[in-house]
Image (cartoon, helix red, strand yellow):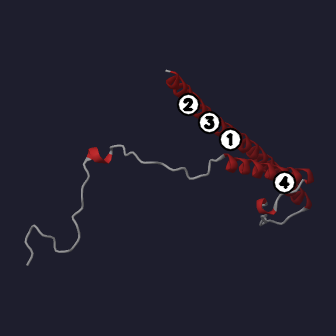
Amino acid sequence: MYSEDELESGQRPPTRKRPSEMYSPKVTSKRTRYDDSTIALKKKIEKSEDSIQKLKAHTEKKTCPKSLRYNVRANIVQDEDFKQDINHIRKDAEQKLIGALTRFHYRKIERNKNKRRKKEQKMNLAKARKTDNEKLGQKLATSGQRQ
């Protein structure tokens, strides 16, 4: 019914890529997955500062947010010394975790401030170029009128 050259199903035969085609670089326009505008960076900085304030309040009260607590029960008979040791270890670990989160947010603020500063510098440089080009165009236009 079908000749040897035809396929029985309606599927296409698989196309095989040559090795040179597989490794050739493709130029694609990459879009960032995050908002890098100065307004967004400012909001991120404010959010981190708010988080630092909350973590500092927990540090002063010697508490830990409920979402960060690790409640585990030991499968052994607890005596008073064991309970005290476990509580001391737990509180120390919680305070160290809060301290680490605070340091994380400080680093995040610094990183976002640097990004925002670079973005503003780039915008100011673009504005300066634009005004320089306009001044140059005006000079050329006035010098052309004098002649």
Callout 2 secondary element:
helix
Q: Position of residue 9 (x, y in %)?
A: 20, 74
Tell me what residue is drawn at x 66 percent, y 40 percent.
115
- Which mark is in front, 2 or 1? 2
Q: Nearer the viewer, residue 25 or 80?
A: 25
Tell me what residue is drawn at x 8 percent, y 69 percent.
4
Give the vertical position of 114 relative to 95 (above or below): above
Q: Position of residue 39 (x, y in %)?
A: 69, 49
Total number of numbered discs in the rendering? 4
Q: Which residue is mark 2?
A: 133
Cα distance between the residues tagged 2 and 1: 26 Å
First in sequence: mark 4 or mark 3?
4
Tag 4: residue type?
Lys
Tell me what residue is drawn at x 88 percent, y 60 percent.
83
Q: Position of residue 145 (x, y in %)?
A: 51, 25
Crowd tier of the residue under label 3, counting other residues whose Cα lies within 10 Å: few below 14, some 14–19, many 20 or above: few
Q: Which residue is mark 3?
A: 127
Callout 3 secondary element:
helix
Cα distance between the residues tagged 2 and 3: 10 Å
Q: Is residue 93 visible?
A: no
Classify residue 14 by image quadrant: bottom left
Tag 3: residue type?
Lys
Cα distance between the residues tagged 4 and 2: 49 Å
Classify residue 111 by image quadrant: top right
Tag 1: residue type?
Arg
Q: Which residue is mark 1?
A: 116
Classify residue 124 by image quadrant: top right
